[in-house]
Image: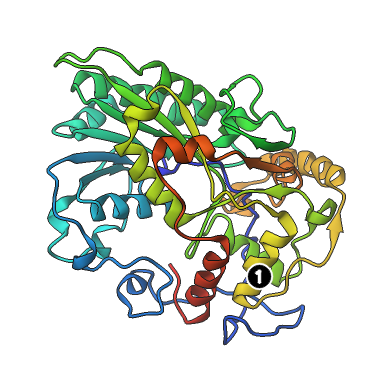
Amino acid sequence: MSSHSSHEPAPRLSASRLSGHRLSTAHAVTSPTARFRKPAQPLAARYTDPAPRSLRPVEEPDFAPRIGERILFTGASGLLGRESVLALLRAGYDVRVFQRGDSGIAALLPGSIRPRFEQVRGDITNAQAVALAMTGVNGVVHAAAKVSVSGEWADYERINIEGTRTLLQATLNHSVGSFLYISSPSVAHAGAAIVGDGAGVASPEHARGNYARSKAAAELLALDANGTALPGGGVLRVGALRPHLMWGPGDTQLVERILERSAAGRLPLLSGGTGLIDTLYIDNAADAVVRGYQRLDAFAGKALVVTNGQPRTIAELLGGFCEAVGVPAPRFSVPAKVAALAGKVIERVWERLPKNVTAGDEPPMTEFLAEQLSTAHWFDQRRTRELLQWEPAVSIEEGYERLGLFYGDGYSR
């Protein structure tokens, strides 16, 4: 299983193996033929560089003293996983990550902090491996999932549903009392516009696509376990967070795909890009995960959508990404219905193509992707902020500035 940070699958624009030359400045005026290329310097260097900062530092003074509590975090290899683990460590927790591959987090940590961090490799569907990883922990943050806009249902069911079931059973067996499930707003999205709503009820029957349906089923499974008696006394507390469209420096699922395609002149706006959407800057997402774990008592048995609370039109959001890095913003529009129809056809063709042709990439357009790029979806955040006692610290505009710093000075993952 590939353990990714679990969230609403960002509209994954197919990279199509584009290449080109990096622009010399973050805000350069460019021609429509300018190309975006990720710089080659390692991501790790960015966390310890002097100001101006584009990523939060990982230097020793930034970490609180140990509080004597160990958290098992599943799926730490993606953007949300990495930043959430770092945020938990900064807050004083010890963290054990569990996934199949190397998270890369140990290399980012100061030597004095590394004893707080542990990495255990294994498959979330392997009950024995999960049980071993659960030994000696005080709580769980479950972010591992198969995250994609395409793929076979059996894979989503095995990883997202049965993997969650296996983890919950181990949590109960070991009398671990805290379980934070990282879900997705897509679990309650049936395709219609979402305009200022709260967190609707997860619906495997009405959610769009295999990812959303499997995450909906897993969220219901997790929340249903809330209040279960533990063998060692007490009860299990379970809450779910649904971060919406996360982005930030080093984001390969959304930001870099947008920049690559827009620089190549291959990113259309759908129906003018007028739909309002709310997103979540990655530092805010990581802070919300920490607060979610700390505030489980306040929302046990419930799900909360988490966003920046700053809706923008899709055209404005994409234009902000592009302007920050100095590539041309999308300049042409396609009717959303045409894109959705094309997406359905492309999905069917893509499934039949040999893997050496698709190279493991996502389809360039899907019906789900067309919906995400054309439909309004923004959420009422009052309940989330009240229950988490949390406010996003980084605005959309500051996020744009950090993108410019990150991609304009030679750093990337």
> Residue 166, image x and y in percent?
33, 23
Residue shown at 69% from the left, 28% from the top: 190
Q: Observer-nearest residue: 122 or 136?
A: 136
> Residue 407, image x and y in percent?
52, 75
Q: Observer-nearest residue: 345 or 167?
A: 167
Q: Mark 1 — residue?
A: 322
Is residue 226 toward the left or the right of residue 366 in the image?
A: left
Q: Is residue 89 above or below residue 159?
A: below
Residue shown at 75% from the left, 45% from the top: 370
Is residue 382 toward the left or the right of residue 46 in the image?
A: right
Residue shown at 47% from the left, 29% from the top: 303
Within 10 Å of the Cα at label 1, are there few (<14), some (14-19), or many (20+) other Cα atoms?
many
Quadrant assignment, res 159 = top left
**Can residue 288 be seen at all in this image of the molecule?**
yes
> Residue 157, image x and y in percent?
49, 25
Is residue 385 toward the left or the right of residue 68 in the image?
A: right
Quadrant assignment, res 254 = bottom right
